Image: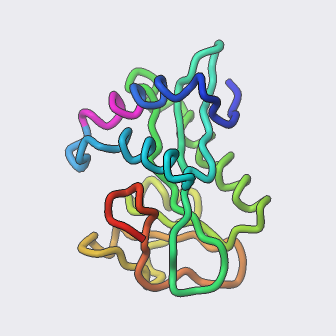
Amino acid sequence: MRIRPETAADIDTIRALTEAAFAPMTFSDGDEQEVIDRLRADGDLTLSLVAEDAGAVAGHVAFSPVTLGVPGEWFALGPIAVWPERQGAGLGRHLIEAGLDALRARNAAGCVLTGNPALYGRFGFRNDLGLTHRTTPEWAVQGLAFGSVRPTGEIRFAAGFGEGV
């Protein structure tokens, strides 16, 4: 398996993969693939990585800019998707680690997300930093600082998430 940036040839597969991965998720609005399309169209898909295995795309992760009330360049992690039959084999972990490493390499201040603390806490994300996002429960709003600036305040995601910046 290798992690690499998406290419134009991957776009249809990423769309189908994301739709399939989120279909059984009760928390999903079912539009995650459209979020990725909008981020890409708006120029806000800052980092889009695929996990390729035996020449086929097996997983995908997206990173896009967010606005916080603190200095630095901050990014959102997500959506992240792995084909249902491939979930649980570590592909998502490899995608997240590669993405976070790439953000560190570009001197980003850190990364934020909304999601399950049991999952994302393994990567250093914390939900006790004072981050908020609209009506999302505080326990699900998480951040990871790469330096000394602590992520706090209201997260404003890129317009592609359908809520504006």
Boundaries of the magenta span:
18-24
Q: Residue furthest left?
A: 26
Q: What residue is at 39 percent from the left and 25 percent from the top? A: 16
Magenta stretch: dominant secondary structure: helix
Question: Is residue 106 depicted above or below 119 in this figure?
Answer: below
Q: What residue is at 57 percent from the left and 64 percent from the top? A: 75
Question: Is residue 73 depicted above or below 122 in this figure?
Answer: below
Q: Position of residue 22 (x, y in %)?
A: 31, 37
Q: Residue furthest top?
A: 54
Q: What residue is at 45 percent from the left and 69 percent from the top? A: 142
Question: Is residue 57 depicted above or below 34 in this figure?
Answer: above
Q: Quadrant of the N terminus?
A: top right
Q: Position of residue 110 (x, y in %)?
A: 63, 69
Q: Nearer the viewer, residue 20 or 124?
A: 20
Res 90 quadrant in image: top right
Q: Position of residue 27 (x, y in %)?
A: 23, 50
Q: Position of residue 31 (x, y in %)?
A: 29, 43
**Is residue 115 in the magenta section?**
no
Res 118 quadrant in image: bottom left
Q: What residue is at 55 percent from the left and 55 percent from the top? A: 44
Q: Quadrant of the C terminus?
A: bottom left
